[in-house]
Image: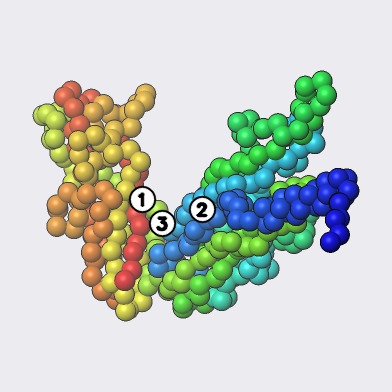
Amino acid sequence: MKLVVTHPHSLWRRLGLFTLALVMLMGCGPRAMAAATSCTSAGGTLDLPAVTVPQNPAVGSLVGSPATVTVTFTCSNLPYSQPTAPSYYSDTATIQAGNLAPADATDNPNGSNGIMFATNLPGLALQLTASPVQANDRAWVRGGPGSTRGFEPGAVTAPSSSWQCIQYKGNGSCSTYGGTYGGSVSETFTAQLIVTGPVTTGTLNAINLMQFNWYVYGIGPSEGYFATLALGSTTVKSAACSVAVDPTVVTLPAVLASAFTGTGATAGQTPFNVQLSCQTGASLSITLATANQQTGTTSVIAPTAGNGYAGNVGVQLLDGKGNPITFGTAISEGATSSGTMNLPFNARYYQTAPGATAGLVTATATYTLTYQ
């Protein structure tokens, strides 16, 4: 038999290797996964209501009603890492708007009036504005990804609560900060059609106006697109009527102050017409409004105050049958007919409070024509 003695140092080395291997195996075991870094958004769609273009619209005029949508961007688990005290790059995640739809020929990339997008209808462009950061399609380093057309709608900045020291100096001060942060930022977009030339009516096609991505300046390139701002489809048609006489001037007769015996008393009723030039084939409504409506009434324009004006006497508007109108409510005028079309109304003095006094009476109202 042979007795073999192992040198203690060799045994220690083997045990050390075994222990090291065990540690390495332990390091390869399951571990907790960190939450994903991301910026997200549902995007948004601008849905313009049906648009009626007036006859012979002026170039540069806005037509139809605007559409507005607010897009919110939410970022989470963004890495915060600084070699020195928090003051440089990686404490901000910036949202970028890029991959923009084609611009209209009237677009001015260096202007301050938003972006003019081309549409499929000749003579009409889409004007897009934004707040609190104005929309812009200038190609520059801080515009779209890779210095393409675009702008930065907002940014999420790390709050001071995210600053965590992950490495200290020998004197106890912090040499490296780290951690994660998140937050949200919103941008409101407004779209409206603008006349650029002779208008062709029809279906306005939907457009993907832009997409959004994000980046952390000084850390890496822009991330991928994660949300879209779109324009929905709508219809554009021509107005059946144009205004033949504008403004419509109504002259009320002179009356004595003694004709007004108390609040609600009326005098001097006078018929008048809103005169239009129309084509057949549309159903017409008219809506009257005033910026100076008498409190407590639906049809009275409040008295004009000042030296030389009558006291406590306003003007009431009535429909063609003599019924008081309601400001802001559409009045159906039926089908349009070819040629001149007169919409009948009446106006009269109206006492708004006790103690009417003599003087001039003036009043102003506006009207809007709606077609179906």
Q: Which x, y percent locates residue 153?
A: 62, 49
Quick check: marks 3 and 1 in contact, CB under 8 Å?
Answer: no
Mark-to-mark CA distance, 3 and 1: 11 Å
Q: As rendered, which of 88 and 257 lies closer to the eye?
A: 88
Disc 2 crowd rating (10 Å Cα; few below 14, some 14-19, many 20+) is: some
Q: Where 294 falls versus 273 (above or below)?
A: above
Mark carried by residue 47: none
Q: Which residue corresponds to mark 2?
A: 71
Q: Judging from the image, what secondary structure is the residue with disc 1 in?
A: strand
Mark-to-mark CA distance, 2 and 3: 41 Å
Q: Which residue corresponds to mark 1?
A: 366
Q: Where 363 falls versus 41 (above or below)?
A: above
Disc 1 crowd rating (10 Å Cα; few below 14, some 14-19, many 20+) is: few
Which residue lies at the image location 34% right of the left edge and 54% below the top edge? 367
Q: In this view, does 146 lie to the left or right of 308?
A: right
* Pair 2/3: label in front: 2
Q: In this view, does 21 lie to the left or right of 327?
A: right
Q: Judging from the image, what secondary structure is the residue with disc 2 in?
A: strand
Label whose residue precedes the other's in the sequence (2 or 1): 2
Q: Where 57 falls versus 313 (above or below)?
A: below
Mark carried by residue 246: 3
